[in-house]
Image (spheres, helix red, strand yellow):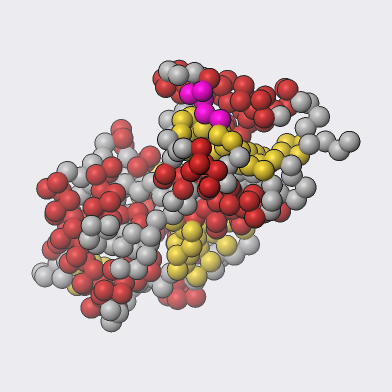
């Protein structure tokens, strides 16, 4: 009788375990219970934190690069490269994780570091650059990204507007003449799991800025500043303002999506689906009897297109049974089944104390893995 084949493809348990640590813990439990099981681990991500790490060992090489962090301090980051395709992760370059001391800076944080990583990738020969846009610290509409690529943002006196979204209200002119000419021959792909526009009740500020530290007064300032910025971009590029502001994904990462689409001519792809393709997930399903996926909280945000949802959809299409492991779930059994999960195994089923679940996550996941194998 052939060995049972199980594919494990879990996202991180935020604040507790990395995606790889989750995968390893589940695999250890499966193999301890059934040593003959054939286990294959496939790292996954959705464009946010951990995207570049997931590509390491999936045919990509990691290239070190020093860039400006969200408050312009130098940080050591990486981008992933395979042939002339590069993947740059905002979270790793200038995202929330890179804020010094974790101090939020909603008005002054910049996306410049992402642009510097893009330039490094182009210098290295990349002709297609994927921008992973989750986990941003900034609300600057991608202004920092454009500055790093050679654009100048000027006020009425001709002086450079300071970095950060809070200063964009004084913007009077955008000079794109200094943009690196190689970008015209570089395909820019925006990998994100949101379809928010730049402005309005579903826009970058209204939806995401609070988690970056923006209070009501900050949000009012930022919304007005981004509106000024959007109007200036439209005037500079000759594009229809409504079209570029309302584009799905324009509001991603504090508006970095807007800059990539409106100025760099990029296109949006679902981050989870794109990354599953890059890591060869569909090929890994060949001959599998079971797929295990999950993340810290299996909830309605997962259903909106995060990495585990992509795994569940792929398993369903391949007619392979899939189960979810998670720290906790807020979904009903019917909702989980509709998502493609035959079963949901939560750490809280084993340990009702959330703090102990986080502290002992690896041990509990191995216990769950033993039940799966």
Work out whether residue 33 or residue 61 is closer to the camera in this orientation and state it: 33
x, y percent for residue 342: 61, 40
Work out whether residue 244 or residue 293 is closer to the camera in this orientation and state it: 293
Q: Which quarter of the image is occupied by the N terminus? A: top right
Residue at the spot 14% in from the left edge and 46% down from the top edge: 216
Work out whether residue 23 or residue 104 is closer to the camera in this orientation and state it: 23
Question: In this image, 205 relative to 297: left or right?
Answer: left
What are the residue bounds of the magenta stretch? Answer: 345-349
Residue at the spot 17% in from the left edge and 60% down from the top edge: 225
Question: In this image, 297 relative to 314: left or right?
Answer: left
Work out whether residue 302 or residue 206 is closer to the camera in this orientation and state it: 302
Residue at the spot 34% in from the left edge and 63% down from the top edge: 250
Residue 96 seen: yes
Q: Which quarter of the image is occupied by the C terminus? A: top right
Furthest residue in direction bottom, as rendered: 238
Counting the numbered discs, the total is: 0
In the image, residue 346 lies in the stretch drawn in magenta: yes
Which is the main secondary structure of the residues drawn in magenta? helix
Residue at the spot 53% in from the left edge and 47% down from the top edge: 339
x, y percent for residue 167: 17, 57
Q: Quick check: 327 above or below 228?
A: above
Residue 162 seen: no
Q: Quick check: 348 above or below 141?
A: above
Furthest residue in direction front, as rendered: 334
Question: In this image, 216 relative to 353: left or right?
Answer: left
């Amino acid at each position: 009788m052939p060995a049972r084949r199980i594919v494990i493809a879990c996202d991180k348990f935020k604040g507790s375990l990395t995606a790889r640590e989750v995968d390893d813990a589940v695999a250890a439990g499966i193999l301890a219970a059934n040593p003959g099981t054939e286990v294959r681990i496939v790292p996954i991500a959705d464009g946010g934190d951990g995207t570049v790490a997931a590509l390491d060992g999936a045919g990509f090489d990691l290239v070190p690069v020093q860039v400006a962090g969200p408050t312009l301090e130098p940080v050591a980051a990486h981008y992933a490269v395979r042939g002339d395709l590069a993947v740059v992760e905002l979270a790793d370059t200038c995202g929330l994780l890179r804020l010094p001391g974790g101090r939020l800076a909603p008005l002054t944080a910049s996306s410049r570091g992402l642009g510097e990583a893009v330039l490094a990738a182009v210098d290295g020969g990349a002709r297609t650059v994927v921008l992973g846009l989750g986990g941003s610290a900034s609300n600057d509409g991608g202004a920092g990204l454009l500055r790093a690529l050679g654009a100048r943002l000027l006020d009425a006196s001709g002086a450079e507007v300071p970095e950060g979204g809070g200063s964009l209200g004084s913007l009077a002119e955008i000079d794109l003449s200094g943009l690196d000419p190689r970008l015209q021959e570089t395909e820019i792909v925006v990998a994100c799991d949101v379809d928010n526009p730049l402005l309005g009740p579903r826009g970058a500020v209204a939806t995401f800025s609070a988690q970056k530290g923006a209070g009501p007064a900050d949000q009012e300032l930022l919304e007005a500043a981004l509106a000024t910025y959007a109007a200036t971009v439209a005037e500079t590029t000759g594009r229809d303002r409504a079209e570029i502001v309302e584009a799905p994904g324009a509001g991603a990462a504090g508006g970095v999506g807007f800059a990539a689409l409106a100025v760099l001519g990029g296109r949006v792809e679902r981050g989870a689906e794109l990354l599953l393709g890059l890591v060869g997930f569909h090929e890994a399903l060949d001959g599998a009897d079971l797929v295990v996926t999950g993340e810290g909280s299996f909830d309605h945000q997962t259903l909106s297109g995060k990495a585990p949802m992509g795994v569940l959809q792929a398993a369903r299409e391949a007619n392979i049974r899939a189960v979810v492991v998670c720290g906790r779930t807020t979904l009903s059994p019917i909702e989980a089944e509709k998502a493609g999960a035959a079963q949901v195994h939560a750490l809280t089923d084993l340990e009702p104390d959330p703090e102990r679940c986080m502290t002992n996550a690896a041990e509990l996941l191995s216990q769950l893995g033993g039940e799966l194998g």
